[in-house]
Amino acid sequence: MNPRPNFVFILADDLGYADLGCYGGRAEPSCSPSIDRMAAEGLRFTDGYSNSPVCSPTRFALMTGRFQYRLRAGNDEPIAGRHRGSPTLGLPVSHPTLASILRAAGYRTALAGKWHLGYLPHFGPLKSGYDEFFGPMSGGVDYFTHRDSMGVHDLFTDEQEREKTGYLTDLISDRAVEFIGRQRGATSPFLLSVHYTAPHWPWETRADEAEARAIGKIIHTDGGSVATYLTMVRHMDEGIGRILDALKAAGVDENTVIVFTSDNGGERFSDTWPLVGKKMDLLEGGIRVPYVVRWPARVKPGGVTAQQAMTMDWVPTFFEAAGAAAHPDYPLDGVSLLPVLDHPERPIERELFWRMKYRGQKAMRSGNWKYLCIEGDEFLFDLATDSRERANRGRRDPERLAAMRARYAAWEATVPPIPEDAAWSIPYAASDIARPGSV
């Protein structure tokens, strides 16, 4: 067996913190038996976070291991279909990535699923370290027509547009399983990124092809249901079960690190209990996401950790496990979680930071305390006793509030300011957004 592990990074799209059975999901039976099995056989994080409460900014952090704000396009919330063809809004091909560093270290690299980091001809997975790619370039794509919110067909094999019949979640799973099957007997390790579009709108199950033909533009604000949403999660989970089976069949199961998470919090049909807030919010429900890690060769089964972590931390974690080094000109902002995988009971102390152009949001977590600013209103929450962020402690503890505000300002000075032309878009009504009380 190659001593260096393989990596499979599975990313859901708009999945809520509590939608999975292993996170107390509301469905009986669970809509996520395969992910639940991963948690039972590995490690579950209770305090894992996305780098952003919206799609493409988190993906910049995942690809680079750095705060997305360091790149111009990482400030758009998110990159939209109208940006197709832009030479500036995308992941620069000169920037080292998770895939490019691992490929230089001898890994085979593949992405099955959503890219959402800029459009051809200027940007794309093959230009940023992946050997092969199958999936859409943009954000939300219809599951049957494979058209984006602008009505443009968006399904590619490598850099060639491809017409293909099928439910997109299943097509992504098929490609991942096929790639793993080709690794049987291989002498080099691999990185497989599996970036599902599920359960992002439009809300369509395998049985809803007629709905796909009826809704036209895919910003699906007039459809969907909790039952549809949970079935979409179940379809994704079935694909993950197939991926687990394929790893075992290929003989690489033991020394493969599998990480499952989401790019941000859920949308209208998701469950964030006991959290408040959803996609686009820096409330906990918008940024706290499931983290499940399975690595039979190293991670003990049935573990739970309270380690506070962000999406970008997986880059240094994978690099350390692979014996690879980050590019010296692009120092990582994330920290390696490898010590936590070995000792879940020994969390690493650190502070986490976020910002959003949308509603002027700022957030910081330090231990159990969270500083939050929305449209100039400031909040201080003790997440140990108030995970729903209802009891604003700012007046009661003004010194802590001032100290956290100052530390946030010191961090913000280390990243570029938000560009004036950075865009944000929100596909649902303002009435859907949770709002805490002000100081």
Image (cartoon, rainbow, N blue to C red):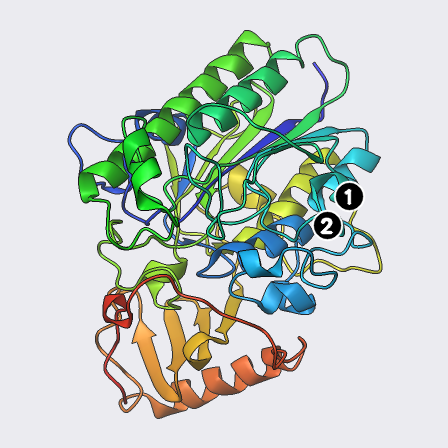
Out of 194 and 154, give the one closest to the viewer. Answer: 154
Query: Residue 183: x, y in percent?
Result: 67, 14
Disc on res. 127? 1
Residue shown at the point (42%, 23%) measured from the top left? 239
Q: Quadrant of residue 437?
A: bottom left
Q: In this image, 250 relative to 145: left or right? A: right
Looking at the rendering, in which quadrant would you find the C terminus?
A: bottom left
Horizontal side, residue 386 vs residue 309: left or right: left
* Image quarter hosting the N terminus: top right
Q: Nearer the viewer, residue 417 or 419?
A: 419
Instruction: Using the rendered image of the protein, determine whether residue 324 is visible from the camera's viewpoint.
Output: no
| Residue 1 located left or right of residue 198 | right
Task: Classify residue 393 by image quadrant.
Answer: bottom left
Neighbour class for label 2 at 10 Å: few (<14), some, many (≥20)? many
Residue at 58% across / 49% down in the picture?
A: 116
Residue hosting label 2: 123
Whole-Å distance between the Cαs marked 1 and 2? 6 Å
Indicate which disc residue 303 carries. Answer: none
- Residue at the image point whose x is 54% and y is 71% from the top: 423
Report if the CB atoms under discs 1 and 2 are less than 8 Å apart.
Answer: yes
Q: Is residue 162 above or below residue 416?
A: above
Q: Is residue 12 visible?
A: yes
- Secondary structure of the residue carrying tag 1 is helix
Looking at the image, residue 375 lies above or below residue 198: below
Residue type highlighted by circle 2: Phe
